[in-house]
Image (tube, rainbow, N blue to C red):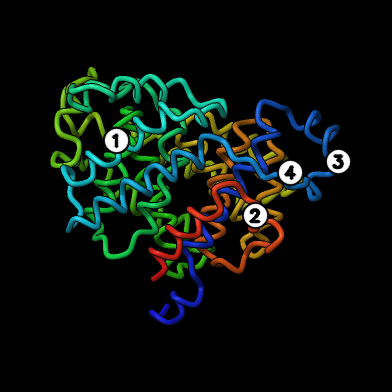
């Protein structure tokens, strides 16, 4: 894809809008099984976007990461020290925000409370948590222009580690950012899973010492390589399940039955990606499929929206939906910055 084609697509705006729309569509269906969702909203292909389109902590934390990332990149080339301070500050600000009343995850709340101190961030990180709270917010890392592969990977894992320090949370965040990056650059959906599997194998034993510091020592692993391998192995296992689901696609079946309910990082990634890949050219249908799931519907749909928006760009979303999404102005501001 040429520079002019990327500019015309406006992938960052599409992804930021899509993740918020997915979040808003899935927020009312979260904690409901599929029969309950169908009883409330009717056939899943017609699930409505609420008025107003209120989002959850998923979008709030994505914006917090986006603001911190923008501050860091305004100061010069992205590195671990330059990224950590503003993102940490944004996460703490989110913790104290009165609008942080959207059923936030326990891991994020505990870690952000601990981050509001002088302690090293590795001591605040919840090393045993691989909840999806880190990779549902990581899209900005995949969208920001000018990052090298090492920067993108290290930044994705570091932002995860601030709250979710489990190696699977780190790997799934890295993989999610990489998927968004590939789609924004024009990778065709049909080849995406193979590329992600190769990426996981290539990075399986790579611990980002400069970005993660001594995080691994807070686990019970004998070496940093053993630590990070556990995370990538979880991701490789769920990528295999995703591949099997796509070999015999069943759009009318709850995607959670194939790749998991999405409460944990690798399953949220895979189930969100499955919903996108079932309908790669039908973004609204993909979001509705993601919202009508028995698992963590808002996080699954949030990820689906990020993938679909990165692939199709800003034009993917109906104007009447995009115009009424909560935090619309800030989502568009960040998207425009990165599209430029």
Q: Quadrant of the N terminus?
A: bottom left
Mark nearest the camera among 2 and 4 is 4
Mark 4 or 1, nearer chain start = 4
Mark 3 or 1, nearer chain start = 3
Around disc 1, counting alpha carbons within 10 Å, would you say few (fewer than 14), some (14 to 19), or many (20 or more)? some
**Element type at mark 1:** helix
Q: Which mark is residue 89?
A: 1
Q: Are marks 2 and 1 in contact (CB under 8 Å)?
A: no
Q: Which mark is residue 42?
A: 3
Give the side of residue 22 with respect to residue 214, left or right: right
Q: Position of residue 114 (x, y in %)?
A: 29, 20
Residue that numbered label 2 is attached to: 278
Around disc 4, counting alpha carbons within 10 Å, would you say few (fewer than 14), some (14 to 19), or many (20 or more)? some
Please identify the quarter of the rendering in which residue 308 is found. Answer: bottom right
Give the side of residue 203 with respect to residue 291, left or right: left
Residue that numbered label 4 is attached to: 50
Mark nearest the camera among 3 and 1 is 1
At x 43% / y 50%, what residue is drawn? 139
Q: Nearer the viewer, residue 303 or 24?
A: 24
Mark nearest the camera among 2 and 1 is 1
At x 39% / y 52%, what residue is drawn? 140
Instruction: Give the Cα separation between the discs numbered 2 and 4.
Output: 24 Å
Furthest-front residue in view?
A: 98
Give the side of residue 17 with respect to residue 51, left or right: left
**Element type at mark 3:** loop
**Element type at mark 2:** helix
């Amino acid at each position: 894809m040429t520079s002019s084609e990327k500019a015309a697509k406006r992938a960052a705006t599409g992804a930021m809008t899509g993740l918020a729309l997915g979040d808003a569509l899935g927020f009312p269906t979260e904690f409901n099984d599929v029969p309950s969702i169908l009883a409330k909203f009717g056939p899943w292909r017609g699930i409505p976007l609420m008025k107003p389109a209120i989002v959850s902590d998923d979008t709030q934390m994505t914006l917090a990461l986006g603001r911190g990332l923008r501050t860091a990149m305004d100061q010069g080339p992205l590195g671990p020290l330059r990224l950590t301070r503003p993102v940490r500050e944004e996460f703490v600000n989110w913790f104290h925000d009165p609008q942080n009343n959207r059923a936030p995850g326990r891991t994020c709340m505990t870690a952000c409370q601990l981050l509001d101190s002088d302690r090293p961030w590795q001591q605040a990180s919840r090393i045993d948590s691989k909840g999806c709270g880190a990779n549902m917010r990581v899209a900005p890392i995949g969208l920001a222009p000018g990052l090298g592969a090492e920067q993108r990977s290290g930044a994705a894992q570091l932002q995860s580690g601030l709250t979710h320090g489990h190696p699977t949370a780190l790997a799934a965040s890295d993989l999610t950012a990489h998927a968004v990056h590939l789609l924004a650059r024009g990778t065709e959906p049909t080849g995406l899973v193979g590329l992600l599997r190769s990426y996981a194998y290539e990075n399986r034993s790579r611990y980002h010492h400069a970005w993660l510091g001594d995080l691994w020592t807070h686990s019970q692993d004998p070496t940093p390589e053993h630590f990070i391998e556990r995370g990538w192995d979880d991701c490789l296992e769920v990528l295999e399940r995703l591949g099997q689901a796509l070999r015999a696609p069943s759009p009318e079946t709850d995607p959670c039955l194939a790749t998991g309910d999405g409460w944990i990082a690798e399953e949220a990634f895979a189930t969100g990606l499955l919903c996108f890949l079932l309908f790669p050219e039908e973004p609204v249908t993909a979001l509705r499929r993601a919202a009508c799931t028995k698992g963590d519907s808002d996080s699954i749909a949030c990820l689906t929206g990020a993938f679909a928006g990165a692939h199709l760009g800003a034009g993917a979303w109906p104007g009447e939906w995009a115009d009424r999404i909560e935090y619309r102005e800030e989502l568009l501001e960040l998207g425009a910055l990165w599209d430029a």
